[in-house]
Image: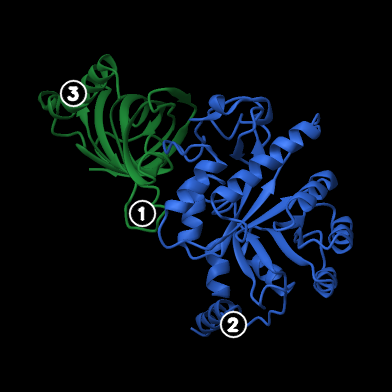
Amino acid sequence: MKRFGYLFLIFVFSNSSCKKGEFEISNLNGNKIGILGHGGMGISSTYPMNSVESILNCLYLDSDGTEIDVQMTGDGVLVAFHDENLDGRTNGSGIVHQMNWSEISGVQYNSPIMQGYEVRSLRALFTALENADKIKGRRFSLDCKNFDGNFGPESLEKYCNALYEIIDEFNAVDNVILELQSDVFIDKVRTERPDLTIFVFQDVEKALEKAINDQLDGVVASIDNITKEQITYAHAHNVMVTLFNTQSKQRNIDAIEMNPDFIETDRLEHLISVLK
Amino acid sequence: MIPPLKKFLLLLRIILCLFAFGGLTFSQTDSVAKHSIYVNGAGPGGYWSLNYAHNFQLGNALYLSPSVGFSTLHLRDFTRTFNPDIIFPVGVHFTYGNKHRAEFGVGETFSSVVRYDAGSLGAKRFLELHTYFVFGYRYQPPLGGILLRAFYSPILEFNQRYRHWGGISIGYSF
């Protein structure tokens, strides 16, 4: 009986150790951590990452927004898809940046079985978001990927124009964060569209240096590659921080304790239950 | 739209399943456990399913078990509305052996799944069919008791693409 008593106490304490409002948040996002889904509902969800269903489900759960993986097809269409290659995750085949959108349109994710969720263009995704009720004003952190080794100025121009077109068409200037990796990409967007929010997604030290020197808005880092001190340093220089790679409840808590401005989580419901 | 020939073949398969379910009572013997209830881990219902099978003895060690199952994946759709995905595997399974049996089966999985529809810009329910096959091992004493299965169950998903799949079952016959 005594043993059950101890077990009960352990259960109670383990469940009450991370209740709402327990964290002292001090950041550049109004002292609140923005809760973003990772590609919507995250990597272990029954909805495939970056599918419309995953993104909408994430927003209807009352998150503050979501990260979306973006890449460009050979004919300049932006696609919400994580991998370079369609093989494996979908019933399609081929490298996204070498294909035209007409070859990708209609491709379905392989998982979950017998569900048939489709790979969508970024435009289709934003159209769905625009027409959905009760989810206005959320943040979309666009992880702008580029797997093309021969990515030249012409392709960059095309990529940037495609991004600007969608952001402007959907009046999303204030809602979009661009996660950019290459200096050339960052410099071009910064020069052409200073109204857009740019987060640097590089090696952390380099990213911090770039963000501080160029007065960019923030950096993106894996929870494993950045320290709490580096986040404090970023805040001191007016640079926000987004953390990702929180695939467990404990890693959500670890991320909160590092005091970032945004967390892109794979355990969305847990993070919402802890922070809201 | 499903082409007419495909539609006809699907209908034929459904009728065969129903015929197998209702039309073979003449070959039963009283001693055989007629009912089986089992849970599938993976298998024709997707990730899991709860199934009922009616058992018929066709010969000395030959049995036929038409089965129907139920499964779901999401109870709420992506707008958080209660709107469950519904999955029904229906099939006929032949087994050969007494306690230890070899199994072959074929059937259709009917899925009613809620997805985003770009036409209506919202959630829409899609009804689809998937043909499945079962090749496996089954432990099922003829007079009843525990039922165990391990099987390879490839699925012709959306009746368009072949997917390797399999599963295990645990249940009871009576």
- Chain ID of residue with mark 2: A
Q: Are marks 2 and 1 on the same chain?
A: no
Which of the two residues, B74 or B61, is positioned nearer the viewer here?
B74
Residue B87 screen position, x and y as percent: 32, 41
The amino acid beneath tag 2 is: Gly
- Tell me the shade of chain B: green
Is residue B140 rendered to the left or right of residue B153? Answer: left
Residue of label 3: B15
Q: Residue at x 57, y 29 (%)?
A: A101
Classify mark 3: helix, strand or loop: helix
Q: Earlier in the sequence, mark 3 or mark 1?
A: 3
Q: Calculate the distance from the C-alpha at mark 2 to the C-alpha at mark 1.
A: 30 Å
Taking the spot 52% from the left edge, 48% from the top edge, the residue there is A126
**Of labels 3 and 1, the one closer to you:** 1
Colour displayed for chain A in the image of the structure: blue
Image point (83%, 60%), residue name: A211
Query: Which residue is the site of mark 2?
Result: A21
Give the residue drawn at x 85%, y 61%: A208
Q: Is residue B148 visible?
A: yes
**Chain under label 1?**
B
Which label is found at residue B75?
A: 1
Quadrant assignment, res B28: top left
Mark 1 element type:
loop
Q: Residue B143, located in which quarter of the rendered image?
A: top left
Instruction: Report the amino acid beneath label 1.
Output: Leu
Q: Quadrant of the C terminus of chain A?
A: bottom right
**Can residue B97 be spotted in the picture?**
no
Indicate the position of residue A192 as horizontal and vertical percent values: 76, 49
Disc 3/disc 2 C-alpha distance (Å): 60 Å
